[in-house]
Image (cartoon, rainbow, N blue to C red):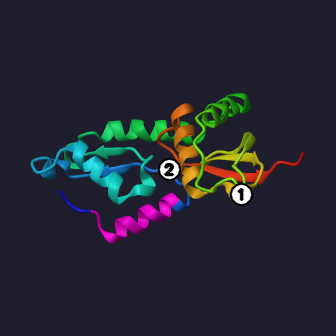
Amino acid sequence: AVSISQVDKKLAKIIAEENKSCIIIVNKWDLAKESAVTEDYGEYLTKVLPGLKYAPIAFTTATEAKNIQSVLDLTTEIFKQTTKWIPTVKLNKAFEMIKQEKIGTSRGKKKGWPKIYYATQIAVNPITILMFVNKPELFEENYLRYVVNRLRSLLLIEEVPIKLLARTHRK
């Protein structure tokens, strides 16, 4: 199978940084399927395009219209996910579950632990969630990535980006 070019990697990085939804489409799969298995190639894409782990992957042969309708159906599903408004109660229940999992950060006790008091969704496309927290600076990138992945799973929005913002909670 064909390897991913630097241009593809650069484009994937921009898509991830801009929190855009996307579908990774591998066309002309009929030419590659002799030398690669879809699952293996999907794993390869996830490794070389780590910022787009959320993006679904579709294998097509456009000249034969193979999988084209399923890609169109998938675009509808992605649009539904990325324009979904999550009720605040449901969102905060998900955050409660994440907090109970007690996954900390590497910070240590001197600076304190990241605490999320509550959260609310403030935008769609991308789904943007504002968290009210003790100290925004305690929310390291790895921890935020973990929270986003858990939210995707708990809220059934697994194939779209989620943008998390942290603001100090005023008491």
75 to 6, vertically: above or below = above
- Pick the residue in front: 105 or 25: 105
Query: Where residue 128 sits in the image (x, y, percent)?
Result: 65, 47
Q: Look at label 1 and name its amino acid.
A: Lys
Residue numbers of the magenta segment: 4-16
Query: Where residue 120 sits in the image (x, y, percent)?
Result: 73, 40
Give the main secondary structure, helix, strand or loop, of the magenta stretch. Answer: helix
14 is within the stretch colored magenta: yes
Quarter occupied by residue 50: bottom left
Query: Where residue 169 sits in the image (x, y, percent)?
Result: 83, 48
Kindly identify which residue carries mark 2.
Answer: 21
Q: Is residue 24 visible?
A: yes
Q: Quadrant of the N terminus?
A: bottom left
Point 57% across, 38% down: residue: 151
- Pointer 2 and pointer 1: residues touching (CB < 8 Å)? no
Q: Which disc is residue 110 wearing?
A: 1
26 is within the stretch colored magenta: no
Quarter occupied by residue 100: top right
Nearer-N-terminus badge (2/1):
2
The single residue placed furthest to the right in the displayed view is 171
Q: Look at label 2 and name its amino acid.
A: Ser
Q: Quadrant of the C terminus?
A: top right
Circle 1 packing at 10 Å, graded few (<14), some (14-19), many (20+), is few
- Pick the residue in front: 164 or 101: 101
* 64 horizontally vs 109: left or right: left
- Pick the residue in front: 171 or 51: 171
40 to 137, vertically: above or below = above
